[in-house]
Each structure stands twice: as structure tokens, then as C-alpha cells.
């Protein structure tokens, strides 16, 4: 019988399968026992913070190649891959950790664990076979060791840190020095992905960054965001031929310009937001046909928005906000059919909204806030954009929006709506059918009357657990205060005409972070529950008609940063539980009827910067009660218009470290408060006038102890408060003289010592106060000559009235030989104890002695050179 070869193979196949299944398993399929032991020791050196964890399956006597997160070589059984990301591991990585004995590792991923306090060990450099290393978000900090450059086979390196360090500059992070950086880039020649976000690269200069061009053939992803890079960024990197992703955002001191040509063709994601990149956006950007996301917000770009941008048909995200760009939105914007997010906030478009925007079928986020839009807008056109979820048209005062009540609005996906400062005079009724609203801002409009019932129903039911922000402030709303949704975090209805009590149902909104009901006509008592809200950071109830006691039950561990209850009718003593507000920065209780002694138990609040108890019924002495560093950050201290007595509080003043240092290196203006949803404000007496600071500069410092019953002398330690801008001690019973140390207050802008019992001379050292704009020394017992020069030449009679023994400009009472008095430059020795009388005596004696000496010289003819010099000058 003839059987061909093919048939024979098919006949024998079952026998081969049987033989294969009968063979014992090869030993090479088992994990190498040394590697298995190393992994178990590594597991036992750590704790599991939460379950589940990938290491749960790691058990002695089982094949480690079958363990979660472990990959073995099929032949040798060595562990070549270890992925423990998101494993809830906690502990420290020590140099002797057994993980560094896994020398065959090609992939190591320890991301998203809790290795806080661990440094990046130099032993990572021993894992020379690594091609992928990921330590991102793992809590590892410290210097990146130079041994990292031994990993010459690296294809990807991810050392990203937590975003928290952006808001907290003291948060520990990884750091890389130029030597390590240079060696790494020179050795890892195949590097494809490099993620160093939040790593400190402040020492890396332009020449070191330029080394990245050596990776032109391999690099496909470069992310160096929030790394403190500065100087000029090499433009050549934007021209690398194979780079699809470049992320440099949040490097505020990093300068650069976009290339005019030779862009990297495959670039898909470019993020330069919050950098100092500047110049024009060139037309050549239109060559990036693969570009999907362009984030250029908060830079210094200027000029026209290039029309070539709107040829990028793959673009899904475009953010050009907060630049100096101008010009209209092209009408051909509808060519961007894939566009999902378009943000042009704070650019000067000076145009109407083109109808082509309503033809973007996939648009889900649109911000045209502060763009100088004008013209008439029929709001129902937005119904054409069925996926629209975010809409911001705020701060366009020339825009007229028509909400036609006869048209059905269909915006089923709208979650965030900002129509602040848009000339709206009624609640938009299209909000009624919305079910998933997260944020609503109708502030700074002209909405009058009571809040509609349908709107209140939406707050209580449909939006009860979804809405996080409601801002109705700066309108003309009347009637009762609306009850906020239970799940809300930001509830802002200040500057309206609301009346009635704060309802007890407010206590259900325990997730509140900011509650601002200021500047209304609310009455009744403050609900006690507000002191127990765990996340509430800003409580602003100022300028209402609230009465009764301040909540007494501020809980431990609370989040309060700002408490403003000023301008009400609150009475009783202060609750001691305020000392639990350890994060408190601003406490303003001014203009109430609070009766108590000075709250010395607040001196332990290390973050407190503003304390205003003005115009209450506080009494007694102010003295330190034992805290080692009382009020160390206090910058604004106002206890004026009370009944305090005794000596001025020198024990506190000498500890006001927040008023001592002057930060000459600070660039730009910085303010207190949550910059997004709340801005701290304060009423102060500045230069003799009540003024409301709508925002509080972090460099603003003032002390106001006026209108009390303080006595004794002025503490010399006040002169050490070098950053002090205002000092008001008027209307007290202070005696003695002005300390010469006051001449050290070089930043002082106003000084009011009026209506006291001060005496002696006005120190000449005060002429050194170059910024002094207002001086009031009236109604005291000063004597002698008023100093001349600099700012003192600008003060009028009102500065010195009621001091009968003063003389000189600007008073009509002249001093003896006042017209011959020397300029201020002769008084530089005031600090050594020379007053005007001593200088006058010295001046007279010196003049007489000089005349006698001159007469003798001319009579004797010696010295001849001096005689010739004087004779020449006279001639």
C-alpha cells in the first residue's frame, strides 16, 4: 500500500502530541530560585498600604513566573520584567534592597506607590539591562545618581513627580545635575521616551538641553513640565524629525520662540503653556498636519492668530488663552471638524462670534471669555452643538445675548456655564431641563428680583449632588437666601440684596469649601454647624446684620484659611475653639460688638497673616502668654478702636517676623486667597482714610493700635520691622520720645502718632524714610526744629498742629536763623546721638574757629598753597 508523506504525517501527529504531553515539564519554565528569593525578600521589606496588591500572589513554594507583575525569560527562567505599579506598596528603598540583585531585569515599573523618604539609589545603575524604568509618582526624591547613565540600553525613562510640588516649592523632589544629565543623554543613545515632569532641572542650561538633538533618530516623547527650566529653550528640538510629543508647560522662566520653518513633521502634541515663550505664532505652524493638541495658554505670544492654524484638520484641542493675540476668528474655523476644545480666553478678538463655530459637530468645550466680543448673539444657536459641555462667554460687556423664551433649547450635555459680566438681567430659562450641571456662574450681571422657584427646585433636587459651583454674586437679587445643593463645594452669592436668616438646611452642604454670603442684608444667628464643616477653607459673612455669638465649635483638623465676620452685630466672647484653625491665614472680626480680652491663645497659629479686631469692645492688656514664636507670619495687625490699655505689646511686636524681612527678589504682584474662586479683601485705615483692599498683596504690612488707652513709651523694636508700610498709634496716651530706630523703617508709607503725649525732638533720622507719603505728629508735645529734606519738604501744617514748641517749615513760626539752617546732609550723625542743638552749637563754634584759623593763615603766609587756593576761589 502506497502512503504518501503527507498522509503519514497526519497519521503520526496524535502520537507526537501524546509524547509531548507525557514528557515532564522543562526546568527552564520555572523561576530562577535566586530571583524568587530576592523577590520574596523585597516583598517582606515593604508594607502593603491598601489591598489589593500584586504581591498578594507572591508565596514561597510557588513558581514566581506565575506571580502577578512578574515576567520571566522563557529559557533561563530569570526575571526580566517587574511591574508593581499601583500595588499600594509602602516603605523605603534601601541600597541593599534585593531588587537590585535582579541583574537580568529589562523592565522595572514601581510607579504609583508610597516610597516616601526614599532616595534614588545609585544601585539602579547596576541594572544595566534595563530598557524601561518607571519610578513615577512613587515618592522617591533626592539627587538622581550619575550611575543612571550606565543604563545605556534605556528606551524609556519615567521619573515624574507629584503635581503638588507646583503649589508647594518646599515639597521634596528629584534633582538632576548637569553632569548626570549629560552622561545620560550621551550614553542612552536609543532613548525614545523621557518623562521628567516635576524633577528639579534648574541647573540644566541651554547647552545641556541641546544634547537632546543627538537623539534625533530615536526620541518620540519628551516631557519636561514643571522642572524649573529657565533661559532659552533650543529651537532645534522643535525640529527633531521623529518627535510626536513635546510637553514643556509650567516652566515660567523658560524662554523661546517657535521656529519659522523645518518643524518636526510628526508633531502631534505640543504644550508650552505657562512658559515665557514669546513672539508670533508663525504661519509655518500650518505644516504640522498631524497636530492634535496645541496648548499655548499663558505665554507671551502676540500678533495675529495665523489663519494657517485652521488648516490643521486633525486638531482636537486648541488653547491660546491669556496671550496678547489679536484679530478675528476666521470664518473657516468649521474646517476643524475634529475640534473638541477651543479656548481663546483673554485675547483681543474685537469681533462677533462667527456662525462657523456653530458648525463644529464635535465641540465640547468653548471659552471666549474676555475677548472683547461685541454684537448680538442668539443663544439658541448653541443648540446646534449637541456635545457642548463647557461654555464660557464671561467678561464680554459689549456682547448682547438674547435668551428667546419661545425657543426650545436643547443642550443635554451642558455641565459648566459661565456668563459672568454679560449684561444678563434674568435667569436663563434654558437651565430648567438640565440634569447634570456642575458649574454655573451668573455673577456680575443685572439680575433683579427674587430667585425663581424653578431655580430653587433645581438646586434642591436635580442638581443636589452634582453641582460643585454656584456663583450669583454681584447682582441685585432679593428675597430669601437660596438653599445650596448638598454636594456643592463653592457657593457664592455676595453683593446682593438678600434678606432673612441663613437657613438651617445650609448644614446639609457639609462638602462646602468656600461659602461667601458677604454684603447682603442677612439677619439672625450664624448656624453652629459651619464651624464643623471639614473642608470649608473660606467663610465670608461680612457686612450683613447677623447677631449673636460666633460658632463655638470649630472642630480640630479643620481646613479654615479665611474667616471674615466683620461688619455685623456679633457679640459675646471669642470661642476658644478658633485655636483649632491651624491653617488660618485671615481672621477679620472688625466692626462688631464682641466683648473680650485679647485672644492670646491665637498666638500659636503659625499661618496667621491678618488679624483684625478693629472697632469692638476688647479690653485689658495685650501681652504674650508663653508661645515660643507667637504670630510668626503676622503682617496685618489691627486692634484699633477698642479699650486696650497698658503698654504697647512689645513682646508680640518683636516676634512679627512676617514684618521684618523685605523680599527684594519677588517679581510681579502676589495676592492672598484662592485665586480661582475667592480673593481675600480687607478694610484698613490707610494714610488717614478707610479703604477696602479688594485683594491683599502678600507684601502689604501694617500695624494699627490707634484709639485705645495704651500708655508708656514707644518700643524701639518697632524699628526692626523693615517691611512695615503703615503704622498708626494715634489717640492713645503714649509718652516719651520717638526712637531713632524708626529711621530704619525704609518701606514706611504712612506714620500716625497724633493725639498722644510724645515729646522731645523729631528725629532727623526720619528723613531717611523715602516712601513716607503721610505723616501725622499733631497734638503732641514735640519741640525744636522740624527736619528738612526729602519727604519732609512735602508735609503740610496738618502734620504738626498742636505742638506749640515746634518751629520751622512748614509752620509759620520760624526758628532762630532758620533761613541759615544747613541742609539735611549735615545731620547724618543723628544716629550717634547728635540732636539739632548739638549740631547748632558745633556749627557756630566751627565757624568761629575757621574764621580765626583763616585770619592766622593769611597773616603769616603759611601754608602758601592754601592761601593761593582760597584767593583764587574768591577772585
Image (cartoon, grey):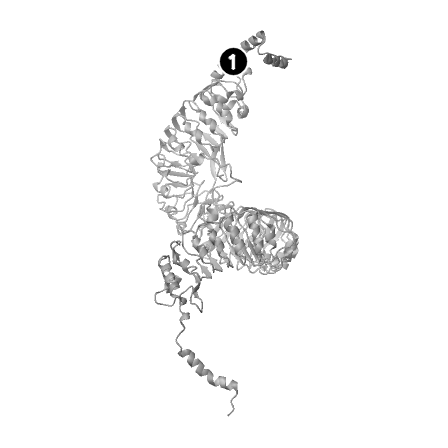
Instruction: Evaluate whether residue 395 shows in this view.
Output: no
**Side of 274 relative to 123 (left or right):** right
Of the pair 254 and 542, the residue shown nearer to us: 254
Question: Considering the image in quadrants, where does the C terminus appear?
Answer: top right
696 over 78 or under it: above or below: above
**Side of 567 relative to 865 (left or right):** left
Instruction: Evaluate whether residue 360 shows in this view.
Output: yes
Number of numbered tags placed on the structure image: 1
Residue furthest left as drawn: 626
Residue furthest bottom as drawn: 1
Residue drawn at x 41%, y 78% is: 21
Residue 156, position as x, y percentages in the image: 51, 58
779 over 507 or under it: above or below: above
Residue furthest top as drawn: 859
Residue 330, position as x, y percentages in the image: 65, 54
Rendered image quadrant of residue 521:
top left
531 over 108 or under it: above or below: above
Of the pair 681 and 183, the residue shown nearer to us: 183
Of the pair 396 and 666, the residue shown nearer to us: 666
**Side of 470 relative to 64 (left or right):** right
Mark 1 surroundings within 10 Å by alpha-carbon count, few (fewer than 14), some (14 through 19), many (20 or more):
few
* Mark 1, secondary structure of its residue: helix
Residue 384, position as x, y percentages in the image: 59, 60
Residue 546, position as x, y percentages in the image: 41, 41
- The residue where tag 1 is placed is 846
Amino acid at each position: 500500500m502506497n502512503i504518501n508523506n503527507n498522509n503519514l504525517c497526519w497519521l503520526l501527529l496524535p502520537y507526537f502530541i501524546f509524547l509531548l504531553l507525557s514528557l515532564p515539564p522543562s526546568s527552564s519554565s520555572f523561576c530562577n530560585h535566586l530571583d524568587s528569593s530576592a523577590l520574596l525578600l523585597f516583598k517582606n521589606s515593604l508594607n502593603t498600604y491598601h489591598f489589593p496588591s500584586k504581591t498578594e500572589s507572591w508565596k514561597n513554594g510557588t513558581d514566581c513566573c506565575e506571580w502577578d507583575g512578574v515576567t520571566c525569560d522563557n529559557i533561563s527562567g530569570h526575571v526580566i520584567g517587574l511591574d508593581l505599579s499601583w500595588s499600594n506598596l509602602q516603605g523605603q528603598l534601601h541600597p541593599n534592597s534585593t531588587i537590585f540583585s535582579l541583574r537580568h531585569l529589562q523592565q522595572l515599573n514601581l510607579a504609583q506607590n508610597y516610597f516616601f523618604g526614599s532616595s534614588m539609589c545609585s544601585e539602579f545603575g547596576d541594572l544595566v539591562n534595563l530598557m524601561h524604568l518607571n519610578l513615577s509618582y512613587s515618592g522617591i526624591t533626592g539627587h538622581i545618581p550619575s550611575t543612571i547613565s550606565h543604563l545605556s540600553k534605556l528606551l524609556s525613562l519615567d521619573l515624574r513627580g507629584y503635581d503638588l510640588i507646583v503649589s508647594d516649592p518646599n515639597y521634596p523632589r528629584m534633582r538632576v545635575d548637569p553632569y548626570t544629565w549629560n552622561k545620560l543623554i550621551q550614553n542612552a543613545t536609543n532613548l525614545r521616551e523621557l518623562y521628567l515632569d516635576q524633577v528639579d532641572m534648574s541647573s540644566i542650561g541651554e547647552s545641556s538641553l541641546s544634547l537632546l538633538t543627538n537623539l534625533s533618530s530615536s526620541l518620540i516623547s519628551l516631557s519636561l513640565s514643571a522642572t524649573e527650566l529657565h533661559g532659552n529653550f533650543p529651537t532645534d528640538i522643535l525640529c527633531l524629525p521623529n518627535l510626536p510629543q513635546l510637553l514643556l508647560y509650567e516652566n515660567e522662566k523658560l524662554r523661546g520662540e517657535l521656529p519659522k520653518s523645518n518643524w518636526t513633521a510628526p508633531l502631534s502634541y505640543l504644550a508650552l503653556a505657562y512658559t515665557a515663550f514669546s513672539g508670533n505664532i508663525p504661519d509655518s505652524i500650518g505644516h504640522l498636519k498631524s497636530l492634535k493638541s496645541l496648548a499655548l495658554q499663558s505665554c507671551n505670544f502676540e500678533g495675529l492668530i495665523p489663519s494657517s492654524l485652521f488648516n490643521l484638520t486633525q486638531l482636537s484641542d486648541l488653547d491660546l488663552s491669556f496671550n496678547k493675540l489679536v484679530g478675528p476668528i476666521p470664518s473657516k474655523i468649521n474646517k476643524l471638524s475634529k475640534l473638541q476644545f477651543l479656548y481663546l480666553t483673554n485675547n483681543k478678538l474685537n469681533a462677533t462670534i462667527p456662525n462657523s463655530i456653530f458648525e463644529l459637530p464635535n465641540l465640547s468645550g468653548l471659552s471666549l471669555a474676555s475677548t472683547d466680543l461685541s454684537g448680538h448673539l442668539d443663544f439658541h444657536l448653541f443648540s446646534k452643538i449637541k456635545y457642548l459641555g463647557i461654555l464660557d462667554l464671561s467678561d464680554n460687556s459689549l456682547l448682547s445675548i438674547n435668551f428667546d423664551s419661545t425657543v426650545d433649547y436643547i443642550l443635554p450635555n451642558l455641565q459648566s456655564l459661565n456668563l459672568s459680566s454679560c449684561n444678563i438681567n434674568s435667569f436663563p430659562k434654558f437651565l430648567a431641563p438640565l440634569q447634570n450641571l456642575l458649574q454655573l456662574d451668573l455673577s456680575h450681571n443685572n439680575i433683579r428680583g427674587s430667585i425663581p422657584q424653578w431655580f430653587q427646585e433645581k438646586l434642591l433636587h436635580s442638581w443636589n449632588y452634582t453641582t460643585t459651583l454656584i456663583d450669583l454674586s454681584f447682582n441685585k437679587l432679593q428675597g430669601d437666601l437660596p438653599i445650596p445643593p448638598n454636594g456643592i463645594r463653592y457657593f457664592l452669592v455676595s453683593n446682593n440684596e438678600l434678606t432673612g436668616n441663613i437657613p438651617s438646611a445650609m448644614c446639609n452642604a457639609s462638602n462646602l469649601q468656600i461659602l461667601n454670603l458677604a454684603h447682603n442684608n442677612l439677619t439672625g444667628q450664624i448656624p453652629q454647624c459651619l464651624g464643623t464643616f471639614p473642608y470649608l477653607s473660606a467663610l465670608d459673612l461680612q457686612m450683613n446684620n447677623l447677631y449673636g455669638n460666633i460658632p463655638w465649635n470649630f472642630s480640630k483638623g479643620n481646613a479654615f484659611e479665611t474667616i471674615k465676620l466683620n461688619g455685623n452685630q456679633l457679640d459675646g466672647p471669642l470661642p476658644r475653639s478658633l485655636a483649632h484653625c491651624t491653617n488660618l491665614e485671615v481672621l477679620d472680626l472688625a466692626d462688631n460688638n464682641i466683648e473680650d480680652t485679647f485672644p492670646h491663645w491665637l498666638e500659636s497659629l503659625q499661618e496667621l497673616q491678618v488679624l483684625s479686631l478693629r472697632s469692638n469692645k476688647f479690653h485689658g492688656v495685650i501681652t504674650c502668654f508663653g508661645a515660643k514664636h507667637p504670630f510668626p507670619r503676622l503682617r496685618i495687625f489691627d486692634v484699633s478702636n477698642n479699650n486696650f490699655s497698658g503698654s504697647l505689646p512689645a513682646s508680640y511686636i518683636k516676634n512679627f517676623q512676617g514684618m521684618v524681612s523685605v523680599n527684594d527678589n519677588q517679581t510681579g504682584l502676589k495676592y492672598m486667597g484662592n485665586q480661582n474662586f475667592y480673593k481675600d479683601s480687607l478694610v484698613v485705615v490707610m494714610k488717614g482714610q478707610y479703604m477696602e483692599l479688594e485683594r491683599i498683596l502678600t507684601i502689604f504690612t501694617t500695624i494699627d493700635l490707634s484709639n485705645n488707652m495704651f500708655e508708656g513709651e514707644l518700643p524701639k523694636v518697632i524699628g526692626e520691622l523693615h517691611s512695615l508700610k503703615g503704622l498708626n498709634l494715634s489717640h492713645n496716651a503714649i509718652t516719651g520720645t520717638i526712637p531713632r530706630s524708626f529711621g530704619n523703617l525704609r518701606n514706611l508709607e504712612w506714620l500716625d502718632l497724633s493725639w498722644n503725649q510724645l515729646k522731645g525732638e523729631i528725629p532727623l533720622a526720619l528723613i531717611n524714610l523715602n516712601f513716607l507719603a503721610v505723616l501725622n505728629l499733631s497734638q503732641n508735645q514735640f519741640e525744636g526744629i522740624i527736619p528738612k529734606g526729602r519727604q519732609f519738604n512735602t508735609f503740610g501744617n496738618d502734620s504738626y498742629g498742636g505742638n506749640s514748641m515746634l518751629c520751622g517749615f512748614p509752620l509759620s513760626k520760624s526758628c532762630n536763623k532758620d533761613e541759615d539752617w544747613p541742609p539735611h546732609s549735615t545731620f547724618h550723625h543723628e544716629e550717634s546721638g547728635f540732636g539739632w542743638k548739638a549740631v547748632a552749637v558745633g556749627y557756630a563754634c566751627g565757624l568761629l574757629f575757621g574764621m580765626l584759623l583763616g585770619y592766622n593763615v593769611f597773616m603769616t603766609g603759611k601754608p602758601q598753597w592754601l592761601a593761593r587756593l582760597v584767593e583764587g576761589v574768591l577772585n
